[in-house]
Image (cartoon, grey):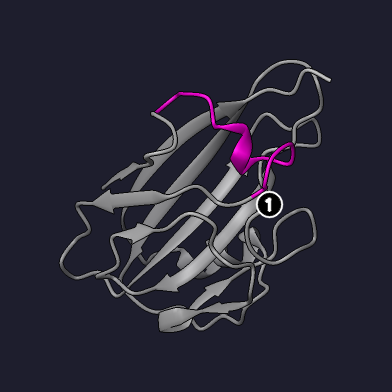
């Protein structure tokens, strides 16, 4: 699967609009190449360069398999249209939490989309770890988009 954004290119800088220094809204995402037998999609955004270890910014799951995009500024409600659910990020909130690294070097932000062979029997508010555990053995394909962000002050 291929995951893209109109807001930034693979390996490119995520615009401040999508970070804690801007509007802190989710960027638009599009994808293709979803396997035919997919029953649901899940998305995880994390920062592998965080000083405390991998930091989770967004957990989204049970998206319909025919969905091919997420528009900008997804609501932070627990349940979205089409029974899509959101988990808790490492800020302790539901939904998207934008890049907010400590000042210094640039951090990488991984958006990973998973095609799954089933809907997950999880409730809104789960952690990334709980989602990954539930997905084990059910991943048909995955795609990734990496953006970077650096704070100077």
Q: Is residue 47 visible?
A: no
Q: Can residue 146 be seen in this view?
A: yes
Left or right, 11 with respect to 73, comes to left
Q: Residue tagged by mark 1?
A: 97
Q: What stretch is highlighted in magenta?
A: 10-24
Quick one: label 1, few (<14), some, or many (20+) residues within 10 Å?
Answer: many
Q: Determine whether 45 is above or below 38 in the image.
A: above
The residue that appears at 80% across and 61% down in the rendered structure is 92
Report x, y in % for residue 49.
67, 29
Report x, y in % for residue 95.
64, 63
Q: Determine whether 78 is above or below 137 in the image.
A: below
**Of helix, strand and loop, which mostly describes the magenta segment?**
loop
Tag 1 secondary structure = loop
Q: Does the magenta stretch include residue 29?
A: no
Left or right, 146 with respect to 149, comes to left
Q: Name which quarter of the figure residue 138 lies in.
A: bottom left
């Amino acid at each position: 699967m291929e995951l893209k954004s109109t807001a930034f290119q693979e390996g490119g800088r995520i615009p401040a609009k999508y970070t804690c220094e801007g509007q802190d809204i989710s960027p638009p995402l599009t994808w293709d190449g979803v396997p035919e037998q997919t029953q649901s999609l899940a998305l995880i955004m994390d920062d592998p360069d965080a000083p405390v270890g991998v930091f989770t910014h967004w957990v989204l799951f049970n998206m319909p398999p025919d969905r091919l995009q997420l528009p900008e500024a997804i609501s932070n409600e627990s349940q979205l249209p089409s029974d899509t659910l959101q988990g808790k990020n490492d800020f302790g909130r539901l939904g998207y939490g934008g890049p907010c690294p400590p000042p210094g070097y640039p951090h990488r932000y991984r958006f990973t989309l998973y095609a799954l062979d089933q809907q997950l029997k999880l409730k809104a508010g789960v952690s990334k770890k709980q989602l990954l555990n539930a997905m084990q053995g059910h991943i048909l394909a995955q795609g990734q988009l990496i953006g970077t962000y650096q704070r100077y002050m």
